[in-house]
């Protein structure tokens, strides 16, 4: 992996992974001493938060699709269209013929 | 204890549900939806709500349920359906109290996506919202990889197979490349904003 990608992997280990207590202390010291690293870590946190929001949006969309699939109205458009056609042509309905 | 109670299968543990959701999200959610939504709808309709209200409340609860389950923080002492109905009953009670106080506002304005007010953030931070916009501009493959890994927490083996990567390592490298692309886009936008 390129060094830039390894840097992202390292950030991820500290932000999302399970660093040891010793690693955490060393990381905190590095953040205090290196403002560029601190800014990098902050940006990475924003990315993770943005991905969380995007994931939530997608999950909501998937739930809508599941809802539509399970409870979509069954051919009501066809029933309505036939009813309108009957009305327009003034065909007697079954009940009227009786 | 009756025979029917004895014969009922034990509630699936959160861990096995977690694996099902990670590996086969759509079918697991569909099954859960089909089993649970009618109960939630009945409860909400009997207490003055509409089918739309029931859907909103149920989907809010399902989003949090999903996140807690795949995040490994859910402790289930009953079936997932019973748990979800309980959350929805609580949510709907909260919503009714809110409507009595503020009769003209909308359900979604009230509790956004979090049924538990203790977990609800006041508002999303602006940088995260900006990132959201840049994610939508990434290529479809990068979007899919990032969301599958970080939000849906799919196993990397599955992500590799679904995106035609020969090895988990290739999928990992691609994931970091996508993250790097997103970082660059956001960084450029921040630099552009601060320069103007």
Image (spheres, rainbow, N blue to C red):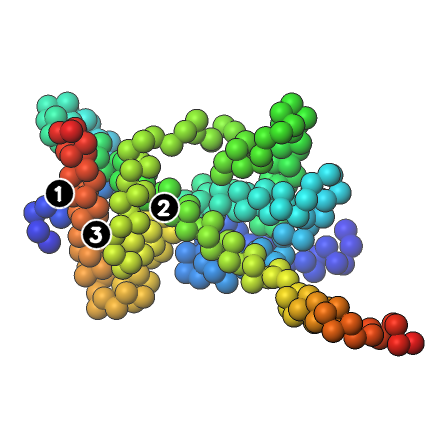
Residue picked out by circle 3 = B178
Contact flag, marks 3 and 1 (Cβ < 8 Å) = no
Q: Is residue B114 left or right of residue B42?
A: left
In the displayed orientation, state which residue is furthest to the left: A3
Q: Position of residue B114 (x, y in %)?
A: 50, 36
Which residue sits at x=70%, y=71%?
A85
Identify which residue, B151 or B55, lies in the foreground. B55
Q: Earlier in the sequence, mark 2 or mark 1?
A: 1
Residue picked out by circle 1 = A7
Element type at mark 3? helix
Q: Looking at the rendering, which quadrant does residue A83 occupy? A: bottom right
Residue B49 to residue A35: above or below: below
Which residue sits at x=19%, y=43%?
B185
Q: Position of residue B147 (x, y in %)?
A: 33, 51
Q: Is residue A11 visible?
A: no
Residue B53 to residue B32: above or below: above
Which residue sits at x=45%, y=58%?
B25
Q: Is residue A64 left or right of residue B151?
A: right
User: Circle 2 marks a residue in which chain?
Assistant: A
Q: Position of residue A24 (x, y in %)?
A: 22, 31
Residue picked out by circle 2 = A54
Mark 1 Cα-neighbour bin, 10 Å: few <14, some 14–19, many ≥20: some
- Distance, label 3 to label 1, CA atoms, is 14 Å
């Amino acid at each position: 992996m390129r060094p830039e990608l390894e840097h992202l992997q390292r950030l991820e280990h500290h932000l999302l992974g399970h660093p040891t207590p010793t690693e955490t202390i060393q990381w905190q010291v590095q953040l205090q001493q290196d403002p560029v690293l601190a800014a990098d870590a902050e940006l990475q946190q924003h990315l993770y938060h943005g991905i969380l929001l995007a994931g939530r949006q997608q999950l909501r969309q998937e739930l809508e699709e599941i809802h539509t699939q399970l409870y979509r109205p069954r051919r009501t458009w066809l029933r309505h269209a036939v009813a309108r056609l009957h009305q327009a042509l003034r065909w007697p309905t079954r009940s009227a013929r009786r | 204890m009756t025979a029917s109670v004895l014969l009922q299968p034990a509630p699936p543990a959160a861990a096995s549900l977690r694996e099902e959701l990670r590996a086969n999200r759509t079918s697991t959610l569909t099954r859960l939806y089909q089993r649970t939504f009618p109960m939630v709808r009945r409860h909400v309709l009997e207490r003055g709500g509409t089918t739309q209200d029931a859907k909103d409340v149920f989907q809010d609860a399902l989003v949090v349920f999903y996140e807690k389950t795949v995040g490994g923080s859910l402790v289930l002492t009953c079936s997932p359906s019973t748990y979800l109905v309980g959350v929805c009953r609580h949510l709907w009670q909260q919503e009714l109290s809110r409507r009595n106080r503020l009769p003209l506002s909308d359900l979604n304005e009230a509790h956004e996506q979090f049924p538990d007010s203790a977990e609800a953030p006041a508002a999303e931070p602006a940088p995260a919202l900006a990132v959201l916009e840049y994610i939508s501009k990434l290529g479809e493959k990068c979007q899919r990889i990032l969301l599958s890994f970080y939000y849906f927490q799919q196993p990397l083996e599955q992500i590799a197979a679904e995106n035609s990567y020969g090895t988990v390592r290739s999928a990992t490298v691609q994931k970091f490349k996508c993250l790097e692309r997103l970082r660059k886009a956001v960084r450029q936008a921040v630099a552009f904003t601060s320069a103007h």
